[in-house]
């Protein structure tokens, strides 16, 4: 291994790195290695707790929504955390689409990917990428029927974000 980039030294986005496209805007200063986008009811006590432990063991600074300080405005803090993360990890699960927060974060993540070249990595946890992209799971159908009544102007954007992100290369886990 070259001593030019020792293993414990993180590359800055300004350094030569093939993960970042040279044709993107200069990103905000990195604060987190990973932003984790997930639906808490599905994974908080299982997969997420294992991921957090692995991040800690490997000294990976991950933003999970429990890092918000009391009194902070939630949405601006989430946007800042997404923008200042090197990688966004999206964990799609059976109940993911029921959270308008998850869907809004997803849209912001895709904007950061386009604007700054942020790395986006999906995990399809007990769901198939095609089902996420088509929103064909019963829980996704039900969630979007409810979203249509409350967030009519945002639904098409959310659907498009799911369709687009379901095409990214990632990990698929199955309980079947």
Image: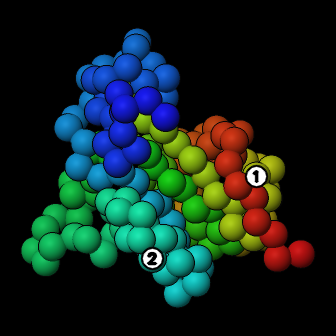
Does 152 sit above or below residue 23? below
Q: Residue at x 22, y 70 (%)?
A: 68
Q: Residue at x 49, y 23 (%)?
A: 18
The disc label shown at residue 53, or none: 2
Residue at mark 1? 129
Q: CA distance from mark 2 to mark 1?
A: 26 Å
* The C terminus lies in quadrant: bottom right
Q: In the rendered view, does 29 fall on the left or right side of 160?
A: left
Does 104 sit above or below residue 29? below
Does 98 sit above or below residue 130? below
Q: Residue at x 69, y 42 (%)?
A: 169
Q: Nearer the viewer, mark 2 or mark 1?
A: 2
| Quadrant in the picture for residue 27 | top left
Q: Is residue 41 visible?
A: no
Dot 2, how many residues are within 10 Å of its Cα: few (below 14), some (14-19), or many (20+)? few
Mark earlier in primary sequence (2, 1): 2
**In the depicted view, which residue is nearer to us: 147 or 102?**
102
| Quadrant in the picture for residue 74 | bottom left
| Quadrant in the picture for residue 91 | bottom right
Q: Residue at x 37, y 20 (%)?
A: 16
Residue 162 x %, y %: 62, 48
Q: In the rendered view, does 143 fall on the left or right side of 104?
A: right
Say if mark 2 contacts mark 1, CB within 8 Å: no
Question: Most extreme residue toward the left, as rendered?
Answer: 71
Question: Most extreme residue toward the bottom, as rendered?
Answer: 45
Q: In the rendered view, does 74 fall on the left or right side of 125?
A: left
**In the depicted view, which residue is nearer to us: 13 or 25?**
13
Secondary element under disc 1, as helix, strand or loop, is: helix
Residue 52 x %, y %: 44, 73
The disc label shown at residue 46, or none: none
């Amino acid at each position: 291994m070259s001593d030019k980039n020792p293993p414990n030294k993180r590359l800055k986005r300004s350094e030569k790195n093939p993960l970042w496209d040279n044709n993107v805007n200069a990103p905000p200063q990195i604060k987190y290695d990973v932003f984790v986008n997930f639906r808490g009811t599905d994974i908080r006590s299982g997969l997420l707790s294992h991921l957090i432990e692995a991040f800690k063991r490997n000294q990976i600074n991950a933003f999970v929504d429990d890092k918000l300080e009391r009194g902070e405005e939630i949405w601006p803090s989430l946007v800042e955390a997404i923008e200042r993360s090197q990688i966004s990890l999206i964990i799609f699960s059976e109940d993911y689409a029921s959270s308008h927060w998850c869907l809004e974060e997803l849209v912001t993540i895709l904007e950061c990917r386009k604007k700054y070249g942020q790395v986006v990595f999906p995990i399809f946890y007990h769901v198939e990428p095609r089902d996420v992209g088509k929103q064909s799971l019963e829980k996704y159908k039900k969630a979007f029927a409810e979203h249509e009544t409350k967030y009519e102007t945002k639904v098409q954007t959310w659907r498009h974000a799911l369709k687009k992100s379901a095409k990214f290369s990632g990990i698929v886990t199955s309980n079947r």
